Image (cartoon, helix red, strand yellow):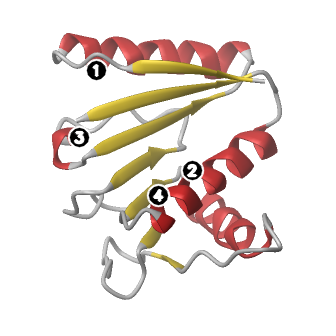
Amino acid sequence: MQIDFYLLAKTQVADKHHYACRIARIAHRAGMTVFMQTADAAHSELLDKLLWTFAQDSFVPHAVCANGEHDSARYPVQIGHAGAPPDCAGLLIPLAREAAPADDCEKFQRIAEVVLNEDADKAAGRARFRFYRERGFEPRTHNIA
């Protein structure tokens, strides 16, 4: 499994969401299924709207998963906050700062962690980085200007 940490130079949550949408679009174009894990229903709705508007030149087929029900065949990019992530072998983009990585994170081919240049988000990112290393993974870091 490949784990990438994208360390943004920016400090606004909107920048984190926009970058996560870019990652989802790239993964979708590469043929991967994507699960964007959010904090709550409002967070899911925000990402749902952003995936429609973040880039004028592309469409990312997506859906908000209700009650943990997933349909990656119809919607290769899924957004959810309730229940477990889908049993797919694609990309996980965890966006809920408070959420710890899932113990079953190995079911994904890749994990993309997006971290803001902001104290609370960096602290949460460091905790997730340690979590992965303690399980034998070697996350890669990318500084994004």
Q: Is residue 79 visible?
A: no
Labelled pair 3, 1 in contact (Cβ < 8 Å): yes
What is the quadrant of residue 41 in the picture? bottom right
**What label sits on residue 132 in the rendered view?**
1
**What label sits on residue 105 in the rendered view?**
3
In the image, what residue type sits under mark 3? Answer: Cys
Labelled pair 2, 4 in contact (Cβ < 8 Å): yes
Question: What residue sits right under mark 2 in the picture?
Answer: 23
Q: Is residue 142 visible?
A: yes
Element on which disc 3 rests:
helix
Question: What residue sits right under mark 4 in the picture?
Answer: 27
> Label 2: few (<14), some or many (≥20) within 10 Å?
some
Real-space Cα separation, disc 2 to disc 4, in angstroms? 6 Å
Residue furthest to the bottom: 74
> Label 1: few (<14), some or many (≥20) within 10 Å?
some
Q: Is residue 29 left or right of residue 138?
A: right
Real-space Cα separation, disc 3 to disc 1, in angstroms? 9 Å
The tag earlier along the polypeptide, 3 or 1, is: 3
Q: Residue at x 52, y 53 (%)?
A: 38
Closest to the observer: 46 or 25? 25
